[in-house]
Each structure stands twice: as structure tokens, then as C-alpha cells.
Image: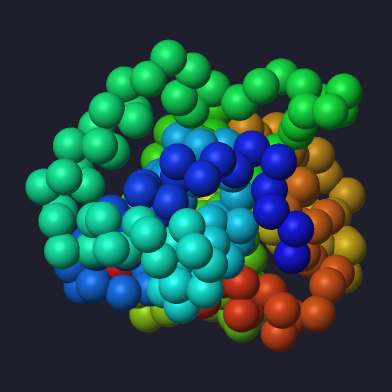
Amino acid sequence: MATHPLWSDDYWLLLLQLYLKKPEGMKPMYSRALVDLSLELHIPPKNLYEQLFKLRHRDTPIIKLIWETYGENTRKLNKDVKKLRSMKGFGQPREFYDGVKVRETFEHDFLPLEGYQELKPFMLIIVLDLYFRLTPITMVTETPEVIDLAKLMKIKPRTVVKVMDVFQFCDPYLNHDDLMISPLLMPCQEVWNRYGNDNPEKLSALAAQLKEYFT
């Protein structure tokens, strides 16, 4: 995959710091630390994960040099990372790149929803995966799967059920003659449009990856 247009070789230091963080090694694509770095750099987690993989294999001269310089000297690494973050313009992508405005949609998935600050769009994706595993009668707060997911995401079971209620409204296979007014309707509909009619195995695989954010 081509290098992301906002990537800078200075960012290898940030990735090395992340790689060396205990437990040392590759971090899951949607781990909280990698996602936070993605939001900071405005580069999608997938791109950073691919760069992290390259860092692990030390397959270019610059990566080898970085390992030689910082691999056994975390104090110097942390000092230079701190200096890098303090530089003017760090984390502020150029509005234009080669005349084309850079637009990222991944950031939207990890920002709190208006009206439901405890929820983020990527959490709706995880709930949608569970939605397809349950029947409407089991989409209640007492269902063990609902309780377990709520515990994982550190929200209340009734919040998971509220999201599922909205997904039922979005589900074209369920007939709804009434109207729904909810701040969750638009974000849930967006998630449904993206994943609701896709291969459920792909949704399941994505949801499993996204759960790494909470572990």
C-alpha cells in the first residue's frame, strides 16, 4: 500500500516508542494507543499498523538507523519524541497536498456522538455485529451478550439496547410504520448503510478488531 500523504519519517520515532511500550511488540490495529496516535497524526490506524509492521522488520536503512540510535536508549527516544511533539505544526496536517484537499473519515468514527458522549461511531459498529447475532426478543438488558458487551465498552446495558432499538428501525427487513426521533438515528443509519448489507463475516472480523480498543 502506498505511504499515506501525511506521513513523515520523523513519525518513526513515535511508532518505535509505541512498539517498545510494554508488552513490547506489534500493537493491535485498533488498540487505544494506536488509535490515539492516529488521531494525533490524522493518519488512519491501518496505515500506521502497516508502518509498524515495517518497523518491526527493519527492512530499510532509515529504520535500521533508528533502531541503532534508539532501540537500547529509551531515554533519548522519549526526549526526542517530546521535542518532536513540541515542534510548530506537529499534528496539524497541511490543508492541501499536491493541490488536493486531504479528507479523512476514520477520525469521525472515534469521536464522541453529539447527544451521546459515551458513544462513538466505532462502538455502534460493534453493537451492530451483536445485533445480527440476536433476535429482537433477546435485545434486552438481561441478555448475557448485551451485559458482556456493555461491560467491555464501559457503558450501561440499556445504552446497548437503545442502539439496537434504533438498528431495528434501520433494518429494512422489519416493517416500521411509525417515526423515530432520536439523536442516535442518523449515526446508526450511517453505520447501517456502511455495514448492514455487507458480508456479516467481514463485519464480525472488523468488530473483533475494534474490541481491541477496550482491552
Residue 212: quarter of image: bottom left
| Residue 127 or residue 172, whichever sits in front | 127
Location of residue 103 in the rendering, given as x and y in whole percent from the top left corner: 75, 33
- Quadrant assignment for the C terminus: bottom left
- Quadrant assignment for the N terminus: bottom right
Q: Is residue 179 above or below residue 71?
A: above
Q: Is residue 176 above or below residue 6?
A: below
Residue drawn at x 45%, y 35% as measured from the top left: 40
The answer to whether residue 156 is left or right of residue 126 is: left
Task: Say whether residue 178 is visible.
Answer: yes
The answer to whether residue 8 is left or right of residue 32 is: right
Residue drawn at x 46%, y 77% as measured from the top left: 57
| Residue 47 or residue 141, whichever sits in front | 47
Location of residue 24 in the rendering, given as x and y in whole percent from the top left corner: 23, 72
| Residue 191 or residue 137, whichever sits in front | 191
Residue drawn at x 66%, y 22% as measured from the top left: 94
